[in-house]
Image (cartoon, rainbow, N blue to C red):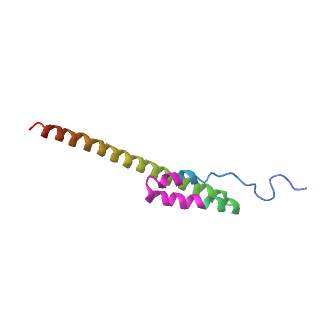
Amino acid sequence: MAQPGYGPPQPQNVDNNMTMSIVSIFLFWPTAIPAIINASKVNPLVQAGDFAGAQAAAAESKKWSKISLIVGLVLWGLAILCCILQVVIFGSLGAAQSNY
């Protein structure tokens, strides 16, 4: 009978953040690519028993996904703001010119 604490390591559940990485590619792809690459490394590392490496890859994936989400949302917000300002400015110029 084996003593407790000895034997093959028990598999740990490490979240690979693949979903967040894939969502982030639609917002800002340059930083989403490293997120997806790191997320794809997590499961093979867990299967190999390298739990520290899997957690490090998951942390990198999460970091790059967050960067991509933040940058993407800021850029989308600026684009929408520019479109709104363009409509307001050109709308007021068109109304001013129609009076002459």
Quadrant including the N terminus: bottom right
Magenta stretch holds residue 38: yes
Count numbered badges in the picture.
0
Magenta stretch holds residue 75: no
- Residue sticking out furthest to the left: 100
**Quadrant in the picture for residue 58:** bottom right
Query: Would you say 7 lies left or right of 36 here?
Result: right
Look at 70% across and 52% down and name the residue there.
Answer: 12
Q: What kind of secondary structure does the magenta stretch mostly adopt?
A: helix
Look at 43% across and 59% down and name the residue there.
Answer: 30
x then y, percent, for residue 46: 67, 59
- Camera-side residue: 83 or 48? 83
- Residue sticking out furthest to the right: 1
Look at 11% across and 36% down and name the residue there.
Answer: 99
Look at 75% across and 54% down and name the residue there.
Answer: 10
- Camera-side residue: 28 or 96? 96
x then y, percent, for residue 50: 67, 60
x then y, percent, for residue 29: 45, 58
Quadrant including the C terminus: top left
Determine whether 45 is above or below 24 in the image. Answer: below
Residue bounds of the magenta highlight: 21-40
- Camera-side residue: 62 or 75? 75
